[in-house]
Image (cartoon, rainbow, N blue to C red):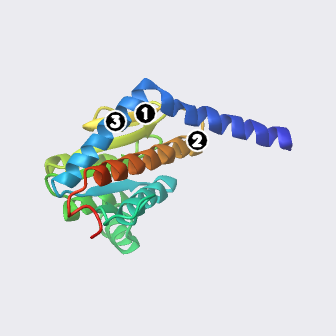
């Protein structure tokens, strides 16, 4: 039992170590700048995913609307996870439309849409990216494996090169999201204006 647990820990560590690659570091730097630009221009984040990735989207959003390590005003971020909306659209249209309709309802030019997916093949996320592009919303994809059909569709993307386990990809995505929140928070507080710090 202990050795099997040790193997799991080793796999998790190896997955997290992919964050140190030049490809990932470049992605993180660019996305942090995109988010900072979005907030400085009074835009918001829209985030979506399926299953565990939707839970990660909700976690990421609440770190922005709450706070991470430093007290500060809320930052606008919305996970497209409302169960009433999702069940309504899935029932009346199709599940493929649940995120696209959310982007249509909330997305404006200057906003940023972030898709979280381990496969890159989810029709509902592909539809949401297309809708975001039509509405002048910038798009970002957190991907895994080969990147799937979503690869190459967004303004910025990152593929976690793990072929076997979706859970390991999600763990890497979540660690990256925590790093992003930490850096965005620190930069905004370091360059604080009256609108970005507590009185």
76, above or below 4, in the image: below
**Image location of residue 79, percent across then percent down:** 36, 61
| Tag of residue 29 | 3
Foreground mark, 3 or 1, reads 3
| Tag of residue 168 | 2
**Tag 2's secondary structure?**
helix
**Image location of residue 196, percent across then percent down:** 25, 61
Foreground mark, 2 or 3, reads 3
Q: In which quadrant of the rendered view does residue 77 lie?
A: bottom left
| In-image side of 101 versus 164 (left or right) | left
- Give the spatial CA distance, label 3 vs label 1: 15 Å
**Image location of residue 99, percent across then percent down:** 31, 58
Badge 2 or badge 1: first in the primary sequence: 1
Badge 3 or badge 1: first in the primary sequence: 3
For the residue pair 42 and 8, the one nearer the viewer reads as: 42
Q: Give the residue pinned by disc 1.
A: 159
**Tag 1's secondary structure?**
strand
């Amino acid at each position: 039992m202990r050795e099997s647990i040790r193997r799991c820990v080793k796999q998790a560590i190896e997955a997290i170590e992919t964050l140190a690659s030049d490809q990932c570091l470049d992605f993180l730097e660019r996305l942090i700048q995109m988010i900072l630009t979005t907030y400085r221009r009074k835009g918001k984040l829209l985030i979506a995913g399926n299953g565990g990735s939707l839970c990660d989207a909700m976690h990421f959003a609440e770190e922005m609307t709450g706070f991470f390590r430093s007290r500060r005003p809320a930052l606008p971020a919305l996970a497209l996870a409302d169960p009433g909306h999702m069940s309504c659209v899935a029932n009346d249209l199709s599940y493929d439309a649940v995120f696209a309709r959310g982007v249509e309802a909330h997305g404006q030019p200057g906003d940023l849409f972030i898709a979280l997916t381990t496969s890159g093949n989810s029709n509902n996320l592909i539809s949401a990216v297309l809708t975001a592009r039509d509405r002048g919303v910038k798009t970002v994809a957190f991907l895994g494996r080969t990147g799937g059909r979503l690869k190459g569709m967004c303004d910025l993307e990152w593929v976690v090169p793990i072929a076997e386990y979706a859970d390991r990809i999600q763990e890497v995505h979540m660690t990256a999201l925590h790093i992003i929140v930490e850096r965005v928070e620190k930069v905004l507080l370091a360059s604080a204006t009256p609108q970005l710090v507590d009185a």
